[in-house]
Image (cartoon, helix red, strand yellow):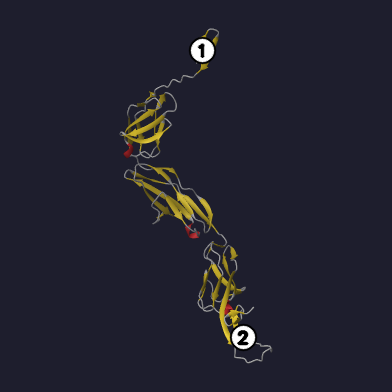
Amino acid sequence: MTCTATYGTNSVSCTFTVTVLVHPTITAQPQNTNVYAGQPLILGVAATGSAPLTFRWLFEGKIIAATDAPMLTISDAQVAQEGLYQVIVTNAVGFVTSAAAFVRVFPSAPAIISHPASLSLPASINHTFSIVASGSQPLGYRWLFNRTPIDRGNGAQLNLTNVQSGDAGKYRVIVSNGLGAATSMVATLTVTPFAPYFVTQPAGASLAVGSIQTFTGPARGTEPIRYQWQHDGTPVPGATESTLTITTVRLSDSGGYRLVASNVAGMATSLVAQLTVHQSPTLLRGLSDEVVDAGNTLRLSVAASASPAPTYAWQFNGAPVA
């Protein structure tokens, strides 16, 4: 709007805006609804009024959701959600409350929405079969492998770790509640051979003579997996497990260790782990008292053994000799 003030031949104008806020009004009330347990419940309302409008949904008089959208969605309706629903529509001017809508939730037997899927996996891979089902809660799950119940299969997911040829076969699940049961389609798991690969590489060490050293190099792949440890490229007799333990380390045990893993699909060789063995210095020949004339040369010597080779630092009256 524009306002003009005039005095004689002089005038002045100003411009201003008038905003009219409109109280919210519900133009379409939420409707009574029937839904089967496990199915989505959707309620809606239509309202006009000055933006922004917010919607607070109530169930049996208690707020259960607040949103800027005029719809309420409950993805898995159950008997506990049966009752009266209302919505409060609010804006800057005020609010209005809808009429109550009654929702009836009918008990229902299980229905499978998403079945487990067949697939092919290389040996040693982890996999999870899953299913999505609806129906009156609580739902019970019983997984079958080649028609035999699986002890650990009692949920909507079945976890398989390090699959092997023995895990190949047909999987299905029976979903049940107090009103009935539903059986999923069969999911077939195919397991293909896979060459070994190391999940942990052996680690090197630096130890004193007489210590204990353990190298570890577990591998995965098609089982059984055969192992052979090598020391500086030469097979270690009897060392055919994924772990090698040297109970009393000797100087001759120094060197590089690696592990060869093999199965029907191939072979893998680990990284080299270096073992360094230390022997504390042992004095073979010590110092002896010497008498020498002033101005003459004094020669002192000692002999020691150690691994690695020892270093020497001379002292005179407790002070280092440069």
| Location of residue 141 in the rendering, given as x and y in whole percent from the top left corner | 38, 49
User: From where the camera sits, is residue 241 visible?
Assistant: no
In the picture, residue 182 is in which quadrant?
Answer: top left
- Which residue is farthest front? 294
Q: Residue furthest top?
A: 8
Residue 315: tell me if it is visible.
Answer: yes
Q: Residue at x 46, y 56 (%)?
A: 160
Q: In the displayed image of the protein, which residue is found farthest to the right?
A: 296
- CB-based contact (under 8 Å), mark 2 and mark 1: no
Can you say whether 120 is above or below 264 in the image? Answer: above
Q: Is residue 116 above or below residue 101?
A: below
What is the quadrant of residue 108 in the picture? Answer: top left
Label at residue 4:
1
Q: Is residue 31 above or below residue 11?
A: below
Which numbered marker is on residue 303?
Answer: 2
Residue closest to the eye, 176 or 304: 304
Q: Nearer the viewer, residue 258 or 103?
A: 258
Three-letter code, disc 2? Ala
Which quarter of the rendered picture does the C terminus lie within? Answer: bottom right
In front of the other: 205 or 153: 205
The image position of residue 84, as x and y in percent, is 31, 32
Which amino acid does the dot numbered 1 rest on?
A: Thr
- Specify few, some or many for label 2: CA neighbours under 10 Å numbering under 14, 14-19, or 20 or more: few
Disc 2 from disc 1: Cα separation: 114 Å
User: SS at mark 2?
Assistant: strand
Query: Could you tell me residue 259's position as x and y percent?
Result: 57, 69
* Residue 144 vs residue 319, the one in the foreground: 319
Q: Residue at x 52, y 54 (%)?
A: 190
Classify 146 as above or below 139: below
Q: Earlier in the sequence, mark 2 or mark 1?
A: 1
Label 1 sits on a secondary structure element that is: strand
Give the image location of residue 264, x and y in percent: 57, 64
